[in-house]
Amino acid sequence: MFAYRLFSTLAISYLSLTASLVAIELSFLEQTTHADLTSGDFGHLGDFVRDHVTSSEQLSLLRELADKKHSSELLFAVDATSAIQTKLHSIGVTLGEFLQIALFIESRLPQYIADGKNYLSYNRTSLPYTLEYDPETKNVFIVLDEMKANFLGSGAIKTVYKAVLYDRSHPQVVARGEQGYVIRRELEITKLLKDAPGIFEIKGFGQHPKIKKHGVVIYSKLYKPGALRNLFNKRITLTLHEKMSVALDILNGLESIHKLGIVHRDLNPGNFLIDISSGKPGGRKVVAAIADLERANYAKNVAHSKVQGAIGFTSPEGLFLQKMKGSDYFAADVYAVGLIFYHLFYEKRASWFNGSYVREVHIPLQTRYAQLVHRINRATKEKRQLLQKKRKSLKITVNEAFELLILKMVHPDPKKRGTASELCQEMASIFKKATVNAENSLR
């Protein structure tokens, strides 16, 4: 009994002491903030909040003080910090650090921008992280490349890290792709396709800090799990309706590209991005997009050039490079996308998928072509003809219609694959019917 009373007494004393310390801390925060707002010393206030603000309670106090002192700078900074608070742990940024950066953006960044300084290294500002401003989109980004935990991936000339798109109401964690060398054509096409349906969502552009003449930075939506290749490798399962959604998004993207007279020429699972929201299959949102426009070019300029960056996605007619006209590359793009849809639908690679048909130059070209066409027909012709008969007799299901569309896209004859616009329209109709069927089944 004595031990219990002693424990209770100690516990009450501890809680009282803790409450007193919290009260002192809040009082100290209030006094310092009041003084800095009165003097307009946002630099000192930023340093102070970085080291002392750690809780929602403190943010609420700062919001009250901002209201009393009519400080829009502090008010907007607190709003932005509160909006991203739950995501800060995932990017390794503390509450105080983000608030300091937000306060700098709201109070001091406009002058730097007016002076033409769009890239502010943390060494220049004494902030925890570097800031970058994009004059085209008017967006401000917080660069997180200094933290290994924010690394997303890399390629031959590209490195991708997480970053933050600053916004007072909806700050977002985004992807920051830093490319060491970019040709002007790629950047022009990327900007031309910004906001186009089915193209990866671009948030802004920046300049490579080390390779200013040829380097470029692209900020974009952060897709999870990322490349469609990740979905295949990790064997993440999608419902058939979700697969249809992915196919429609990709065909929208292909149509966006082809409508401008441009061909992609590097359509593989690594260059398709997919974002899957939380939730159970069937009740989540799945979004897909085409990315990486490094090899994209106007069709009129690509005659006799390599058909696809990943040679396994080369269409049969693409083996005859010397005969390939610029306009032929549209159908070659469709074939490459069809191969990916085949993998998506059947959850396995096409049996004929093999880059050896391109590499094995010691075998006569006509022989390689005949072998490839034979293998495609052996795997697809009978099923395609069966589904065509069912469609003609109006007995085809939406699932079968989706399958038929895919088998048409990988047809050995490029004239029978359909254009991106035709396929997109057909896929939209299939997806609409599948959605109606799914909704009716729930009633």
Image (cartoon, grey):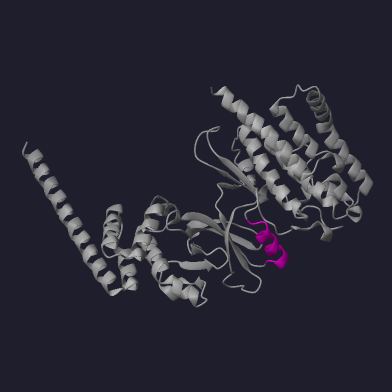
Question: Between residues 196 and 150, which one lies in front from this camera angle?
Answer: 196
Front residue (pair 443, 22): 443
Q: Residue furthest left?
A: 2
Q: Residue at x 40, y 65 (%)?
A: 101
Residue 39: x %, y % from top left = 27, 74
Q: Is residue 200 left or right of residue 43?
A: right
Residue 192 shown in magenta: yes
Indicate the position of residue 179 as horizontal and vertical percent values: 63, 64
Q: Which residue is drawn at 57% across and 56% down?
A: 220
Nearer to me, 98 or 370: 98
Magenta: main secondary structure: helix
> Could you tell me which residue is drawn at 78 percent across and 35 percent down?
407
In-image side of 59 versus 310 (left or right) = left
* Relative depth, front residue between 374 and 412: 412
Q: In which quarter of the image is residue 43?
A: bottom left
Vertical order, 371 against 273 (above or below): above
Residue 7 lies, with reference to residue 310, above or below; the image says above
Quadrant that contains the N terminus = top left
Which contiguous range is marked in magenta?
A: 182-194
Q: In this view, does 284 lie above or below 304?
A: above
